[in-house]
Amino acid sequence: MRYDSTSGHAIEATGLVKRFGKTTALDGVDLVARQGRVLGVLGPNGAGKTTAVRILATLLRPDGGQATVCGYDVLRDAHQVRQLIGLTGQYASVDEGLSGTNNLIMIGRLLGMPRADARARAAELLARFDLTDAAARAAKTYSGGMRRRLDLAASLVGRPRVLYLDEPTTGLDPRSRTDVWGMVRGLVADGVTVLLTTQYLDEADQLAHDIVVIDHGKVVATGTPDELKAKTGGQVLQVSPADPARMAEVTALMAGLIKVEVATDAETGVATAPVNDAAIMPHIFRELDDRGIELAEFTLRKASLDEVFFALTGHRTEDERNDRELEGSRR
Amino acid sequence: MTAIPLLARRQTPLGGMRNTFTLTWRSVLKIRTNMEDVIGLSLQPIMFLVLFTYVFGGAIAHGSTHAYLQYELPGLLVMTVAFATLGTGLMLNQDITSGVFDRFRSLPIARWAPLAGAVMGDMVRYLISVVITIGFGMVLGFRVTTNPVSAVAGCLLLLAFALALCWISALIGMLVKTPQGVQAFGFIAFFPLVFGSNLLAPTATMPGWLQAFVKVNPMTLLTNAERGLFTGGSVASPAVQSLLWALGIFIVFAPLAARVYRRRT
């Protein structure tokens, strides 16, 4: 009997390094997933998220560092790790030539289930993922959302303790995204530990108990969503003049008082700036009033994860599309 | 969280065999659902038979298309099976690029099972093309002039050779990035082997330099053995030589393919 009851960590990785030729995909990544919780791995394309998942799923050997799943080493005890995990890739990896039912029966049989059990489990999962009507059709006729659901079902056939979801909602329409979120919540309620990679900040915000932010193969921040928001400025002041012509004036005034760069959105006519000290608020308000600037909006709100990410990495999450090719070419 | 029960350290050989059977079943199911593949598998030998018999028949066998059919059919069997093995590389390539093999490798199954399952499943495809070639050949007038046992032995020898040859294709399938690339490289590797042999025309009609290649080409040896088994002639020597070639190809290419498979996936 081997389990990690002391730390309560389903996944522990320390100092993971992976190089592809001259490029360093992972440069010493540490991460921990608590049992029965969702760990969100957040980062732009090419940050190293997929590489990290592939190492933790025993598909790739790290060049340095080590990782365990429920106490089992991903290199030394790979076969045991494979008995504990489920994997849903960024590109849905179902067999296009097989029907939904046969895809799931195949996995069940590979996991050693008797034929009848594999068939029953397939029917159960197809019903749960709303695929019963399409069960007999070849997966190549499925829509993107259906394929993703089948992929998710396939990763659950063996009732994994730890589930890796590598960008499970990339390319999905909003409704399918919400469906996937609901399924993830259901799995967590059943005690499954989930490692979720995403480039959508709202997704991490919605689902993750803990977040690791990765950029250029390095961890740039860890914590709960709230901790991360508090860590980087915490709050954001949002000001919108009633007369758009006075935008420049407002921006200059805010920049002068807060001493940070003020972001302006010409389309919405809103100026935003991170605020560390709320005591400055009345000050700004009085200055604006003194100059006779009428306001349409003056609000202090919690920073969104998007702003947190920007503060941490200096760029937005949608950057660096071409870095995908690095990971893609290694598949 | 409940304790995790003691987990197996590795897959047992018997478990690995069971994994292979499941993955063979998968490949066979795919033949049934992929109509394009079935049509290709059946139409290609029929097309070869009609074209070669009636285009070359008159010129090569002194005007007798029937005599040429008797001569070429064993050769066409070799050709059909050789080209059918290209499909193995193509499918492996698709499985790798589509991410299906990633899923297999994340499962607690024998590491070699996906590769073995793909190859075993393809044996069914090879058998289909052999049966169609002989069947349609008979419609055109081909007759087995030895005996049924020899004919069955001929089919088994073809399958044994295909089982070796498909590892070359598997290797190409895993080395090349795209399915189109697999097709291109596969044809470059297989065309000289298939056509640089006596499977369509007698060796004696070729120039000396070509004869030198044709005589050592395993396709020639296999064709000779097939001719012996289906229409009479010496069998033992070419059959043993073809089997030795098959063994050699297997010994070289199966481990190479397995190695690339471990590295690439």
Image (cartoon, rainbow, N blue to C red):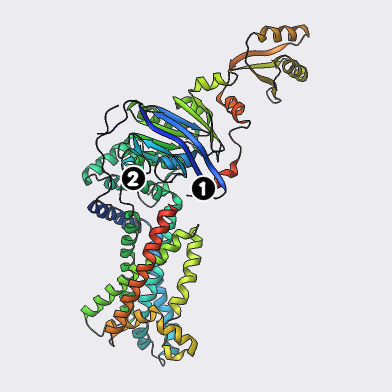
Q: Give the class, few, some or many, for how many residues have Cα within 10 Å of label 1's Cα (few <14, many ≥20).
A: few
Q: Is residue A198 above or below residue A307?
A: below
Judging depth in this view, the residue of A287 and B63 nearest the camera is A287
Residue A302 position, x and y percent, is 57, 17
**Badges 1 and 2: C-beta atoms under 8 Å apart?**
no
Question: Which residue is pictured at 68% across the width and 23% down the height?
Answer: A268
Q: Return the mark for residue B107.
A: 2
Please tell me in which quadrant of the rendered image residue B229 appears: bottom left
Can residue B198 be seen from the camera position used here?
no
**Left or right: where B211 falls relative to A78:** right
Judging depth in this view, the residue of A170 and A72 nearest the camera is A72
Residue B215 position, x and y percent, is 41, 85
Judged from the image, the secondary structure of the residue bearing numbered disc 1 is helix
Gap between marks 1 and 2 measured at Cα: 21 Å
Can residue B59 be seen from the camera position used here?
yes
**Amino acid under label 1?**
Gly
Question: Which residue is pictured at 41% across the width and 78% down the height?
Answer: B50
**Left or right: where A304 falls relative to A124:** right
**Amino acid under label 2?**
Leu
Residue under label 1: A328
Residue A212 position, x and y percent, is 49, 30
Q: Is residue A27 above or below residue B70?
A: above
Please tell me in which quadrant of the rendered image residue A14 appears: top left
**Left or right: where B125 falls relative to B5:** right
Judged from the image, the secondary structure of the residue bearing numbered disc 2 is loop
Q: Return the mark for residue A252.
A: none
Q: Is residue A321 above or below residue A273?
A: below
Q: Quadrant of the N terminus of chain A?
A: top left
- Marks 1 and 2: same chain? no
